[in-house]
Image: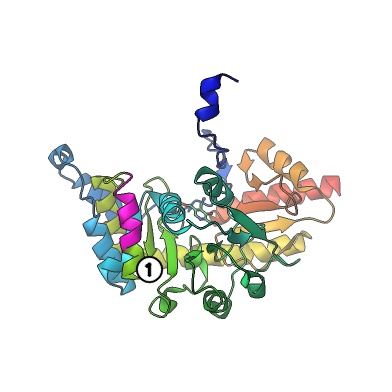
Amino acid sequence: MNLWETNIRKAVPYVPGEQPDQQRMIKLNTNENPYPPAPGVAESIYASDTDRLRLYPDPEAGVLVNALAKRYRVKPEQVFAGVGSDDVLAMAFLTFFNSQKPILFPDITYSFYDVWAGLFRIPYQTVPLDPQFRICAEDYEIPNGGVVFPNPNAPTGELESLALIEHILQHNQDVIVIVDEAYIDFGGTSALPLLNQYENLLIVQTFSKSRSLAGMRIGYAFGSETLIRYLNNVKYSFNSYTMNQLTLTAGAAALRDEAYFKKTIHKIIATRERVKEEFQKLGFLFGDSQSNFLFVTHPDVHAQKLFEALKEEHIYVRYFNKPRIDNYLRITIGTDEEMDVLLDVLRGYLKKNV
Ligand code: PMP
């Protein structure tokens, strides 16, 4: 190693699911929404005044923040917006996790958490999920520098109750507790009602999944006015103009179409429940996912073999070669037609190989 290399900040980056560019493929590996964004999104982009792009965007992301505040019945001062929830979470880690004590998160969870902890030099300790991949609230009653977990958890899809979240909050009043609700719209109850009681609670959500806008990169957080102020102070010390003008307009347009939002979510939930029944018939084991993906294992075929067999058929799912989950596949819920092709391929494979 050159001497100058010793001074470089080394990071072990997050590895996102692949984005293959194939005409004929079924992409069930990154939990995107199979349906297009609300029609108003395209209309708002076409109607945008491109001359406005000469100017910097609103650093406060006002149109989006106000629309979110109205939709979720909170004050605009309680809303933070960012470039996808990854950006919001990264800013939140940087702002709120600044203790010598380790932050806590589940051993099986969103694999970006340990990456940010590494990048920002935040000590962390993982807390094992129980054998059914559920969070044990009592395990979070130890000294720590903060807590973060997704609900529903990823990649398991397991939804925890508000009672469990409140238990964790009650035992962690001196640190910030972040609940990552990337998948909450697919059947969960948001922790939003707890916001008024717990000034140390930050709830993070995204437009990437339930609002079909992964490509736009819009995430947001709800918290007490104090938390949001701290978060904005760090953001404005990093990059004032994170969200571009077209994104702000498109995000606000997506929020206006509540009927479309509900319709696509109901479709995905209906497909998910049907696919659960079919997977059961094929002998798969899995939890009762309340997200837009299933996390499955099969007693007779190794997950990695299935992963590769599906890839040969141009069906992309996610395989994590990690402790405790290296025999599982995470499969995004696509359209009914896509899931039928997947089920046919699985049926054929299992018939031949089991
Ligand atoms: N949290 C969880 C649990 C996720 O699975 C994802 C998706 N990779 C994100 C946050 C980030 O999503 P986005 O940045 O697209 O909002």
Q: Residue at x 71, y 57 (%)?
A: 296
Taking the image as shown, residue 259 lies to the left or right of residue 132, namely: left
- Res 40 visible: yes
Which residue has dot 1 on it? Answer: 223
Q: Nearer the viewer, residue 204 or 137?
A: 137
- The secondary structure making up most of the magenta span is helix
Q: What number of labels is visible?
A: 1
Q: Position of residue 188 (x, y in %)?
A: 52, 71
Where does the image place residue 216, in percent across and percent down from the top left?
36, 47
**Magenta stretch contains residue 230:** yes
The three-letter amino acid code for the residue at tag 1 is: Gly
Where residue 180 appears, x then y in whole percent? 49, 62
Say few, some or many: other residues with alpha carbon within 10 Å of mark 1 (under 14 / 14 to 19 / 20 or more): many
The residue segment tinted magenta is 229-238
Toward which corner of the image does residue 11 lie, by quadrant?
Answer: top right
- Does residue 256 appear in the picture of this structure? no
Give yes or no for residue 287 being in the magenta stretch: no
Secondary structure found at label 1: loop
Placement of the N terminus among the 4 image quadrants:
top right
> What is the residue that sits farthest to the left in this orientation?
51
Looking at the image, residue 265 sits to the left or right of residue 348; the answer is left
